[in-house]
Image: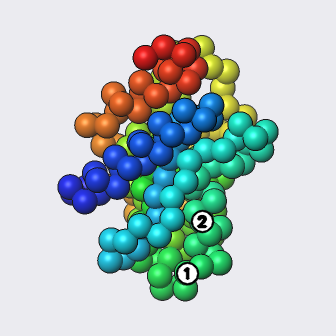
Amino acid sequence: MDEGDLRHLRRCVELAAEALEKGDEPFGSVLVSADGKTLAEGHNEVASGDRTRHPEFELARWSASHLTPEERAGATVYTSGEHCPMCAAAHAWVGLGRIVYAVSSEQLSTWLTGLGVPPSPVRPLPIHEVAPGVTVEGPAEELSDQVHALHRRFHRGKP
Ligand SMILES: [Zn+2]
């Protein structure tokens, strides 16, 4: 993980904060081409009632209709929280490249349990359990406090 990766991850954290401002769960993701250009970005939109509206899932589907297989393979998905199994599967099915995340599903599960949040209906498997062929980097320790704070605010309304 280099400075360029961290720059994209910081943008993911900004998007997560935007989601929180809108009353949604604080998760954000960015799709970046092989030459470092931001192609698309998004944040959780599950407050609509559709709990599959994760940004990584949206980016995978966007890439399938806008990019060639070669472009997808060369692209990187940056995300504030490690892909859940649904999103990891979508990422692998459309043939996207590397994933870089700020905090792992394991970190997040520990935090949410600490906040008294009921367990998710989907087991928080690491990406490599679902999509063993995908190159994955993370977590980025320098961002973990910031991401943790966003989740505390969402679940407790406290800074
Ligand atoms: Zn997901």
Q: Is residue 9 above or below residue 92?
A: above
> SS for tag 1?
loop
Q: Is residue 7 above or below residue 50?
A: below
Residue, far right:
49
Q: Residue at x 48, y 85 (%)?
A: 70
Residue, far left:
3
Residue 37, percent from left and from top: 37, 71
Q: Residues within 10 Å of mark 2 (few under 14, many from 20)?
A: many
- Which quadrant, please, contains the C terminus? top left
Decide if residue 126 is in sight here: no
24 and 109: which is toward the camera: 24
Q: Residue at x 25, y 55 (%)?
A: 1
How is the model colour-coded? rainbow
Q: Amino acid at mark 2?
A: Ala
Q: Amino acid at mark 1?
A: Leu
Label placed on residue 25: none
Question: Left or right of 48: which side holds 101?
Answer: left
> SS for tag 2?
helix
The answer for how far apart the CA atoms under marks 2 and 1 are is: 10 Å
Q: Is residue 44 above or below residue 37?
A: above
Which residue was labeled with disc 1? 67
Q: Residue at x 65, y 67 (%)?
A: 61
Q: Earlier in the sequence, mark 2 or mark 1?
A: 2
Total number of numbered discs in the rendering: 2
Q: Residues within 10 Å of mark 1 (few under 14, many from 20)?
A: some
Question: Does the CB distance between marks 2 and 1 fall below 8 Å?
Answer: no
Residue 79, percent from left and from top: 45, 50
Q: Is mark 2 within 8 Å of ligand 1?
A: no
Which residue was labeled with disc 2? 60
Residue 110, percent from left and from top: 49, 24
